[in-house]
Amino acid sequence: MTTFVSATREVAFAPGSTWLRAQSIKMRFLDLACIVIAVGGAHLLRFGTADVTVAGGDTELSYTTLSVVLILTWTAALEFGGTRDPKVLGTGSDEYKRVAVSSLWLFGCLAVVSYVFQLQTARGYVSVALPLGVILLLTVRFAQRRSLHRSRLEGQNLHKVLLIGAPNNVNHLSDKLNQHIVSGYKPVAALLSDSVSTAATNLPVLGSSPSVDMVLSSIDQTGADTVAVCGGAHLDPAFLRQLGWALSARDIGMIVAPALTDISGPRIHMQPVAGLPLIHVTTPKLEGLQSIAKRGFDIVASAAILAVLCLPMAVVAFLIKFDGCGPLFFLQQRIGKAGESFKMYKFRSMRVDAEAQLHALSQQNEGNGVLFKMKDDPRVTRVGKWIRRYSIDELPQLINVLKGDMSLVGPRPPLPTEVAAYEQHEHRRLMVKPGITGLWQVSGRSDLSWEESIRLDLYYVENWSPAQDLMILFRTLRAVLARDGAY
């Protein structure tokens, strides 16, 4: 058995995460600064330095007083809205959602109060303060998250996690947490839920068949501030209840990781029944009104993008023709929704005889083993290297979107040879239209392994939502500018 040795702490309680408290305090000051700038800016833009009184009603209220009250209540709304909850700081979209919702609720209440007391609050004042404040708050949160992620990649600002479970479950959760270290959880040791062999574990093992005292002793040894119970662990419910009490007394976090993978938050709902927290996993909605809304968005957005980029695309077309003879577009057979084939449009970035040379270059494949990729492909033209670097060659796929063959966001459009080699579960990729961009596009593109590419596509299908599409479109712009995995 692998052991993990360190000095035993003499303190009765494990210390809290000082970085977490510092982060929370920092966010309070930054939020306050954003609100003061937004409200103060709205006051100056609308009234200048004059101390104007709110019109209407019997109450004498100056806009200076209203601004001070608004700053205080906005700060309180963010506090009670859970925008600084450690569970949402630094990961996921809940942090941004809570900031926006708390702000909208506050200004909704302001509208109700103005109506009840017949206060004619200046629309110019409100129309500046609300959007400016939300934009500043979200921008600062985004910048803080990037800074936090960088520090976590350097091994700082991390929760130390003690894992409890069977070896395979411990390994799975440990691998996932280490792969996504920016979420803030660093596995440090494990306790096995039974007396099986420990040879397969990839963490220091401090014991098996754990008791509450063993868990607390392991916390003292490792300095862990979080305990994660892995799904599938054969543990007595009474033990978990007692463990929860003991950890609460020490201010140690407790996580129960269910044996569910690649399921996003919106599909998971907890319902307490007879003292049991039952987890409901809903089925993703791929049809009906949401599907109609997605198609409508595709049509409007793709038409608008084509209208804006028609002249730059014409310049690209001229450069391709000027660079050499051959067709302007490269048409390739791809498989779409429900297995239907279609012709996918791309600006031609390779020589005309590129397909004929593929066999001769097959031994130099630098892709994921299924798709052929070369970072310095000799078949790529001079203009082709440039348009591929910035994904400009994919712009004609907007025509496929307008025709209904593709969507703006979706799984990567597969080749017929790929689909022929699919395993049974991989056919779920074909439940939705392929996309110009998707999770694969914003997660590394050509640098991804085949298995990771499949996993991301399946995750998208299983967890599709309009909010996720918007997030992917935003991240696509960053990925294209960064040129990660583009060759």
Image (cartoon, helix red, strand yellow):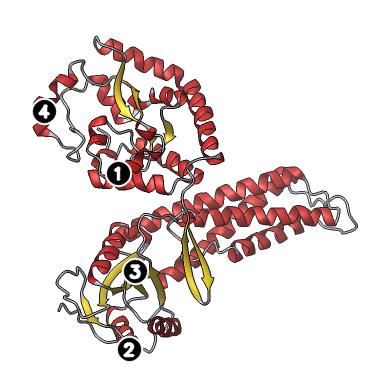
User: Viewed as shown, does residue 405 lie left or right of 372?
Assistant: right
State the separation of the CA atoms marked 4 and 1: 28 Å
Badge 3 marks a residue whose secondary structure is loop
Q: Nearer the viewer, residue 65 or 221?
A: 221
Image spot of residue 122 (x, y percent): 78, 46
Is disc 2 surrounded by few (<14), some (14 to 19) or many (20+) residues within 10 Å? few
Badge 1 marks a residue whose secondary structure is helix
Q: Which residue is mark 2?
A: 213
Quarter of the figure that contains the N terminus: bottom left
Q: Which residue is mark 1?
A: 426
Residues marked 2 and 1 touching at CB (< 8 Å):
no
Q: Which residue is mark 4?
A: 361
Q: Earlier in the sequence, mark 2 or mark 3?
A: 2
- Give above or below for 40 relative to 21: above
Q: Earlier in the sequence, mark 1 or mark 3?
A: 3
Q: Earlier in the sequence, mark 4 or mark 1?
A: 4
Instruction: State the residue at coordinates (54%, 63%).
Output: 28
User: Could you tell me if residue 88 is visible in this image?
Assistant: no
**Label 4 amino acid?**
Leu
**Label 2 amino acid?**
Asp
Residues marked 2 and 4 touching at CB (< 8 Å):
no
State the separation of the CA atoms marked 2 and 1: 45 Å
